[in-house]
Image (cartoon, rainbow, N blue to C red):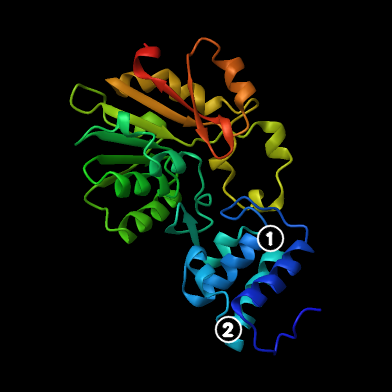
Amino acid sequence: MDPEPSQALSVNQSIELITHKLEAANLHYGHGAIDAQSEALWIVSKQLGLSPADALDHLDQILTSEQHQQALAVTDERITSRKPLAYILGEAWLMGVPFFCSEQSIVPRSWIAELIVDGSLEPWLPADGKVLDLCTGNGSLAVLLALSCPDIHVSACDISLPALSVAARNVDRHGLNSQVELLEGDLWEALPEPNEDNLFDLIICNPPYVNADSMNALPAEYQAEPALALAGGDDGMDLIRRIIANAPDYLSERGAILLEIGNEYENFKKAFPQIPAIWMEVSAGEEQVLLIQAEDLR
């Protein structure tokens, strides 16, 4: 039997109670939490002013009645609104780094983040190198790049001014204004004409890639995000075709472009059978993120 809300609860007891409430509500996850228990931890950790990871060291701590009641209020809003928890809390965590979050952009998440943090991209990140984060959205990947490699310069662009306002808050939050430059425009139109002095050593991109059938079947949590940041056309490849077509003009001789395509592996292979992509291993497998070297695009 769940403890009464008025009863003094430990962090762990509060997490268990909220987990049960979330599990009974038939919610969908994937916006920074993989299941109900992870989301319950996130809700309770917010009341403690801790990261979800740090809250695991405080499971026996007793919550104040106000903290538990506020956690329950957040839980109820999550259940009734079906919005991603990150929008309700105004914050998301990616690779242990906090980011401001609002409905002006998608919730920070990308398998590319794993490759940034684990050092897999270092061969394409020379000292004083230049990196482009195309379709930056909330700016989280640009921030992670800058934090991981303090000696590189990061340009980050997006077509959405509302999304760029979120990115600007995240760049400022982490004190990276001198290292990360934000640009507005439709893909390559955000950038100056390419020349020998402004080519990139690495371009990363988590573009809109959800195919039309999948878009029509998205649960409410994903429908709460800007469709502009998700929809990739009939086969999910509309923007990726434009990205790959012009990428060679913006890459240095030994540069590369890293693309996240999610569940669109088959559509990518069908659209680009001639490209010798290097498939990168991430926690979700080896068909979600690919790298193409500049020499294989020319």
Left or right for 34, reference 196: right
Horizontal and vertical percent for residue 171? Answer: 33, 54
Q: Classify mark 2: helix, strand or loop.
A: loop
Q: CA distance from mark 2 to mark 1?
A: 20 Å
Residue at 34%, 44% in the rendered image: 145
Horizontal and vertical percent for residue 82? Answer: 69, 59
Looking at numbered disc 2 in the image, what kind of residue is underneath it? Leu
Tell me the residue that label 2 is attached to. 63
Horizontal and vertical percent for residue 30? Answer: 62, 50
- Nearest the camera: 92 or 189? 92
Left or right for 275, reference 298: right
Can residue 80 be seen here? The reply is: no
Tell me the residue that label 1 is attached to. 36
Q: Residue 154 appears in which quarter of the rendering?
A: top left
Disc 2: CA contacts within 10 A as few (<14), some (14-19) or many (>=20): many
Residue at 46%, 42% in the rendered image: 114
Looking at numbered disc 1 in the image, what kind of residue is underneath it? Ala
Can residue 264 be seen here? The reply is: yes
